Image: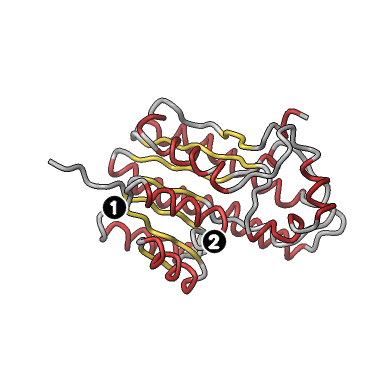
Amino acid sequence: MTESPRRVLVTGGASGLGRAIAAAFRAAGADVVIGDVNADAAAAVAAEIGATALALDIGDEASVLAAAEHITDAGGLDVLVNNAGIVAGGGTLQEVPVDVVDAALRVNVRGTFLMLRVFGALLADAGRGSIVNISSIGARQPTPGLGHYEATKAAVDALTRTAAIELASAGVRVNAVAPGPVLTPLTAGFASDPQARAAWESRIPLGAIADVDQVTPLVLFLASDAASHITGVSVAVDGGQLLV
């Protein structure tokens, strides 16, 4: 009897790291749902990699509940990757606009909370599953001008630990992957500036900003049965940046 492929939902899967994660799960044989606030982009990527697109605004409770109902009706879920996140802007804590802070909180904290609340319950009801949250080393290492964003990722790490404890008895594992800077459309601005890129890479002992393909294997591992005794951790993929 052939085992059914795992069903995986990747939020923010229409671009950047989320797109790479979705493609990696598809290449591994999973049925992938790309959830993204940009429905057109999600549909385009889904068509390209053989996935399913789902319009999803993780900061909106009604949208999250509708997504959960849709996925339940379609056969349920095995893996949730909470990848959707935004920086929204920058500036010191005295300078950053409050609406930038509110936007980051809405997606990164409220959105992660809502996904854990709704889909954590869905997986718990099934008695199995794995959740991988995408955090950041910024949760542990400050960069001036990004304090608002780093605070949201510290919250993601805290939510990861709490969810891991609360869902363990239901057979659901919850972990996080915490990248340093990764080459994506989000970082294209500074990465294309030789001076800015060199300044950042000088902070990384291994000397380079990560490619998405250097992050995706850890996401797949933590979601897999090979990581069946791992829960509640946030694992850095940062070329050693947290060491300095």
Q: Amino acid at mark 1?
A: Gly
Q: Helix, strand, or loop for circle 2? A: loop
Q: Which mark is residue 76?
A: 1
Q: Is residue 5 above or below residue 140?
A: below
Residue highlighted by disc 2: 15
Residue 210 lies, in percent from the top left, at: 64, 44
Horizontally, is 85 left or right of 173 in the view? right
Q: Residue furthest bottom?
A: 40
- The picture quadrant where one finds residue 205 is top right
Q: Residue furthest top?
A: 229
Q: Nearer the viewer, residue 221 or 85?
A: 221
Q: Helix, strand, or loop for circle 1? A: loop
Structural crowding at the residue carrying mark 2, measured as other residues with C-alpha within 10 Å and reported as few (<14), some (14–19) or many (≥20): some
- For the residues bearing labels 2 and 1, Cβ distance under 8 angstroms: no
Q: Which quadrant is home to the C terminus? A: top right
Query: Which residue is drawn at the image coordinates 44% and 42% (left, top)?
Result: 131
Query: Which residue is drawn at the image coordinates 49% and 58% (left, top)?
Result: 13
Q: Amino acid at mark 2?
A: Ser
Q: Nearer the viewer, mark 2 or mark 1?
A: 2
Residue 52 lies, in percent from the top left, at: 36, 63
Q: Is residue 3 above or below residue 32?
A: above
Residue 182 lies, in percent from the top left, at: 64, 48
